[in-house]
Image (cartoon, rainbow, N blue to C red):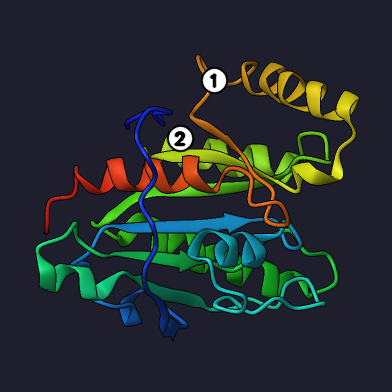
Amino acid sequence: MPAASGSKEAMDVKHAEFMKSSAHPQECPPPERPEYAFIGRSNVGKSSLINMLTNRNSLAKISSTPGKTQLINHFVIDEDREKNGAPASWYLVDLPGFGYAKVSKSSRVKWQRTSEQFLKSRPNLMCVMMLLDSRHSPQKVDLEFMEWMGENQLPFVMVFTKVDKLNLEERASFLPKYEAEMLKRWHRMPPVYVTSAEKGEGRDEVLRFIEQTNALFEAP
């Protein structure tokens, strides 16, 4: 998995549109484009981050009710660029959030099972974007999900959200604390991106990573 590079200008998202919602992985679009799955606990700021990355105000619907995303939502990015010999377009996938306590246990289990089935079944999945709220200490459900991805050999990066909500002291300390917890279970940290949807921070770095990773895609 390539590391982000600071020397190359990030790609610019020219076009982004909703493609379809799927209740089951078998209903998803054909695996003909590189795909990036965004997942995290409910209220982690997933929709806001997706809108920030695509430079759209409402591509992903932002709800005041955590746990609103219950389907696998596919967005196609820069589809028209393929017609001009430009780099291939790609899928951005918004997966159901997990860990939201105010829905039934059966619903939580169903949503997580749907996400896990999707992640294990997509041959075009290039990377899972694991979203983590920078304001919170490492959460058991996040750590366990990352361990599950490791056990299933799913490539993932850690994307910390809402960094604008931290004061200077918190900003300096949150990542070392998380690294210390991760290294109890992992030999090394996966790539890390620090973002703020409100300030646009981290956008170039995440998009640069996606562009570099797209170059590794081989159509099934």
Amino acid on which the number 1 mark rests in the picture? Trp
Label 1 crowd bin: few (<14), some (14–19), many (20+), radius 10 Å: few
Q: Is residue 146 above or below residue 87?
A: above
x and y percent of residue 105 in the render? 75, 69
- Could you tell whether 179 is left or right of 150 in the image? right
Q: Is residue 97 visible to the viewer in this orientation of the structure?
A: no
When asked about the image quadrant of residue 80, the answer is bottom left
x and y percent of residue 209 in the render? 39, 41
Q: Nearer the viewer, residue 213 or 84?
A: 84
The residue positioned 56% from the left and 57% from the top of the image is 39
What kind of element bears circle 2?
helix
Label 2 crowd bin: few (<14), some (14–19), many (20+), radius 10 Å: few
Cβ–Cβ under 8 Å for marks 2 and 1: yes
Q: Quadrant of the N terminus?
A: top left
When asked about the image quadrant of residue 6, the answer is top left
Q: Is residue 150 above or below residue 17?
A: above
Q: Which residue is mark 2?
A: 150
Q: Which residue is mark 1?
A: 186
The residue positioned 50% from the left and 14% from the top of the image is 187
The residue positioned 34% from the left and 34% from the top of the image is 8
Distance CA(mark 2)–CA(mark 1): 9 Å
If you read the primary sequence from the N terminus, does the residue marked by circle 2 or circle 1 appear first?
A: 2
Q: Nearer the viewer, residue 219 or 213?
A: 213
